[in-house]
Amino acid sequence: MQILYVSENPKARYVESIKIVQAGDPVLRRVAAPLTRQEIGTARIQELIATMRDTMREAPGVGLAAPQIGESLQIAVVEVRAEQLARRGYTARELAEREMEPVAFHVLINPKLTVVDSTPRNFFEGCLSVSGYAAQVARAHAVRVSALDHDGAPVVILARGWHARILQHECDHLKGTLYVDRMDSRTFTTGENHERFSRPDPTE
């Protein structure tokens, strides 16, 4: 059994990204179907994984679940690039508070999430399927995810902080749950107002 990250799928060539499904589409509220190891190895699923990877990167986002591109299947991809963190202009304090750091690209199929540290961490969260908005969501501080990778091999992901938040967010998608179901509704805001009023002054 592999521990932590799996490398990027060398078989997944670049493909065109596709439109991300938005809130209100019934596919986002279905419980996604699991895949067999035989299905994972098919050209259709390998191409779907490549499409998800490139759609996530083009958005850009740090995670994407198959239902977000209209496929009710238990597949999620996750990646946090150093340039994404730099581009967002997070202060050192923000990065430390959120335990934000780069995360290598990995694929999760049929994931099973277990909470390791249930201490609630309350930070703003957004979603590519609720475009243009954000809200505070309490998430467990640390989790373990058991899943299959792009080749159908078992993997275990141990994550804390922001990576743990992303994993919880993506696993929720596969159960038909959106972050708006878990948010503190009084903090719900447009992305523009989040930048204006919710983030600390970078000069602090």
Image: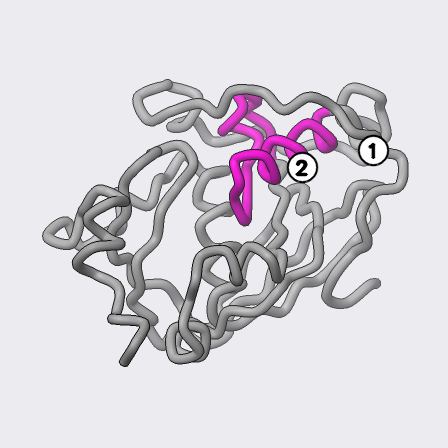
CA–CA distance between discs 2 and 1? 9 Å
Q: In this view, does 21 lie above or below 120?
A: above
Image quadrant in which the N terminus is located:
bottom right
Within-10-Å neighbours for mark 2: few <14, some 14–19, many 20+: many
Q: Helix, strand, or loop for circle 1?
A: loop
Across and down, in percent, residue 96 comes to 44, 79
Across and down, in percent, residue 109 comes to 68, 42
Horizontally, residue 160 falls left or right of residue 93, namely: right
Q: Is residue 114 above or below residue 166?
A: below
Q: Disc 2 vs disc 1: Cβ atoms closer than 8 Å?
A: yes
Q: Which residue is drawn at 22% across and 42% down?
A: 190
Amino acid bearing label 1: Ala
Across and down, in percent, residue 88 comes to 44, 57
Q: Helix, strand, or loop for circle 2?
A: helix
Where is mark 1, residue-wise? 12
Amino acid bearing label 2: Arg
- Location of residue 144 by image quarter: bottom right
- Location of residue 47 by image quarter: top right
Q: Which residue is drawn at 53% across and 55% down?
A: 167
Q: What stretch is highlighted in magenta?
A: 48-74
Within-10-Å neighbours for mark 1: few <14, some 14–19, many 20+: some
Horizontally, residue 38 falls left or right of residue 21, namely: right
Q: Residue at x 89, y 35 (%)?
A: 11
Sequence-first disc among 2 and 1: 1
Task: Give the total of numbered labels.
Answer: 2
Where is mark 2, residue-wise? 53
